């Protein structure tokens, strides 16, 4: 057994694409790959843990497909620790939107890793440095290497689609700020309530600010900026909003791009004291691709005429950008 792939079972679609790349592009036999998501990897009645330990011990290299599902799995983290302790040749492959920081609290934080986004980087680090130089596989012919690079490029594009469908962006990796247009610090406050952010708005909070704000905004800032340009016919921005006690009846959602925070899209929605699902189709017809490639902020804007008696509360949560959540829009 040459290659052991450590992954989350929830990412079966992704790992099978990766196995196909190893077989079709790297010319590695299926029998030389151990991956629990592959057919017949584990025989009926076989001790699951024992089989994983044996195949981990017998492998020449361990490849980790690091996703949020992987990090959230206690079993995957245990498997990571076992591989780190017993294997010299290990290689973490980080799947966007995660970055290198995701490994900071793991045994792999000092191990060379790669983010699965750049085809040339994957070709050099996985094929040349990890598999060929370590003599896991022989060097391919010139034509085979050319074909491999083409397959890696297609694979990285497929990964972007997979990530868009299954992970999208996560508001947990954003910086969240709340601002009042007139600068009044008492006009707005925010707190985390379960999986939702609760924003309290008061357009007449402070006598030292006699001019009320034209708006109060909850802003999700992304550094680095997000790329939403890999879209399909079903791509959508999704969130849930609720107005506590019907104190706010409308919210405007704005998309901004670039360092200059150019607003290229806005739409206003009615809300009430029940959680409302908000879905905004992402389309080149209404949103230029160049702007979607450089998303810097998503803003939830409340205006004075949206609020009952100038005071209100809104809950915002479950922000997603993906394909598979949208149906019958």
Image (tube, helix red, strand yellow):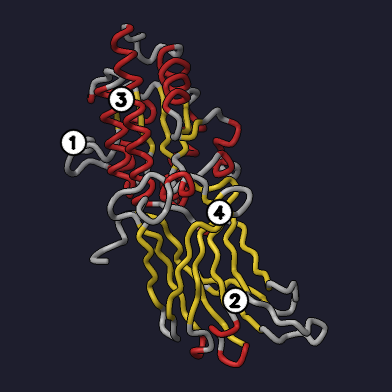
Q: Position of residue 127 (x, y in %)?
A: 41, 18
Marks 4 and 1 sit apart, C-alpha to C-alpha, by: 38 Å
226 sits left or right of 177 in the view: left
Marks 3 and 2 sit apart, C-alpha to C-alpha, by: 47 Å
Give SS at disc 3.
Answer: helix
Judge the density around disc 1: few (<14), some (14-19), many (≥20) Cα neighbours within 10 Å.
Answer: few
Picture quadrant where residue 239 is located: bottom left
Residue bearing the label numbered 2: 199
Which quarter of the figure is the C terminus placed in? Answer: bottom left
Residue bearing the label numbered 3: 151
Marks 3 and 4 sit apart, C-alpha to C-alpha, by: 31 Å
Instruction: In this rendered view, identify the residue nearer to me: 186 or 53.
Output: 186
Please report whichever mark, 3 or 4, sits nearer to the chain's N-terminal start.
3
Please report whichever mark, 4 or 2, sits nearer to the chain's N-terminal start.
4
Residue bearing the label numbered 1: 40
Q: Nearer the viewer, mark 1 or mark 3?
A: 3
Circles 2 and 1: CB atoms closer than 8 Å = no
Instruction: In this rendered view, identify the residue nearer to me: 184 or 36.
Output: 184
Which numbered disc covers residue 64? none
Q: Is residue 62 above or below residue 302?
A: above
180 sits left or right of 248 in the view: right
Q: Nearer the viewer, mark 2 or mark 1?
A: 2
Give SS at disc 1.
Answer: loop
Please report whichever mark, 3 or 2, sits nearer to the chain's N-terminal start.
3
Please report whichever mark, 2 or 1, sits nearer to the chain's N-terminal start.
1
Q: Position of residue 124 (x, y in %)?
A: 46, 19
Judge the density around disc 2: few (<14), some (14-19), many (≥20) Cα neighbours within 10 Å.
Answer: many
């Amino acid at each position: 057994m040459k290659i052991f792939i450590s992954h989350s079972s929830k990412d079966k679609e992704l790992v099978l694409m990766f196995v196909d790349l190893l077989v079709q592009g790297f010319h590695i036999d299926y029998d030389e790959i151990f991956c629990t998501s592959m057919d017949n990897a584990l025989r009926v009645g076989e001790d699951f843990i024992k089989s994983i330990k044996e195949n981990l011990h017998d492998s020449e290299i361990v490849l980790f497909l690091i996703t949020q599902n992987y990090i959230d799995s206690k079993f995957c983290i245990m498997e990571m620790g076992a591989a780190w302790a017993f294997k010299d040749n290990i290689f973490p492959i980080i799947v966007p939107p995660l970055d290198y920081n995701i490994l900071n609290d793991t045994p792999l934080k000092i191990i060379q890793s790669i983010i699965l986004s750049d085809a040339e980087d994957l070709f050099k680090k996985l094929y040349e440095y990890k598999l060929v130089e370590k003599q896991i596989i022989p060097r391919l012919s010139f034509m085979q290497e050319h074909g491999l690079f083409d397959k890696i490029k297609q694979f990285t594009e497929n990964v972007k689609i997979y990530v868009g469908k299954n992970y999208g962006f996560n508001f947990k990796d954003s910086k969240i700020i709340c601002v009042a247009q007139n600068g009044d610090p008492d006009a707005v406050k925010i707190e985390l309530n379960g999986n939702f952010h609760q924003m309290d708005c008061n357009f007449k909070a402070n006598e030292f600010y006699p001019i009320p704000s034209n708006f109060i905004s909850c802003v999700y800032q992304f550094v680095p900026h997000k790329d939403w340009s890999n879209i399909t016919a079903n791509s959508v921005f999704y969130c849930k909003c609720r107005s506590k006690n019907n104190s706010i009846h409308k919210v405007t959602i704005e998309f901004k791009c670039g360092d200059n925070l150019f607003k290229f899209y806005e739409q206003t929605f009615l809300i009430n004291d029940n959680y409302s699902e908000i879905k905004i189709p992402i389309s080149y017809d209404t949103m230029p691709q160049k702007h979607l490639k450089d998303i810097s902020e998503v803003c939830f804007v409340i205006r004075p005429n949206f609020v009952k008696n100038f005071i209100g509360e809104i809950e915002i949560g479950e922000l997603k950008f993906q394909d598979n959540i949208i149906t019958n829009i």
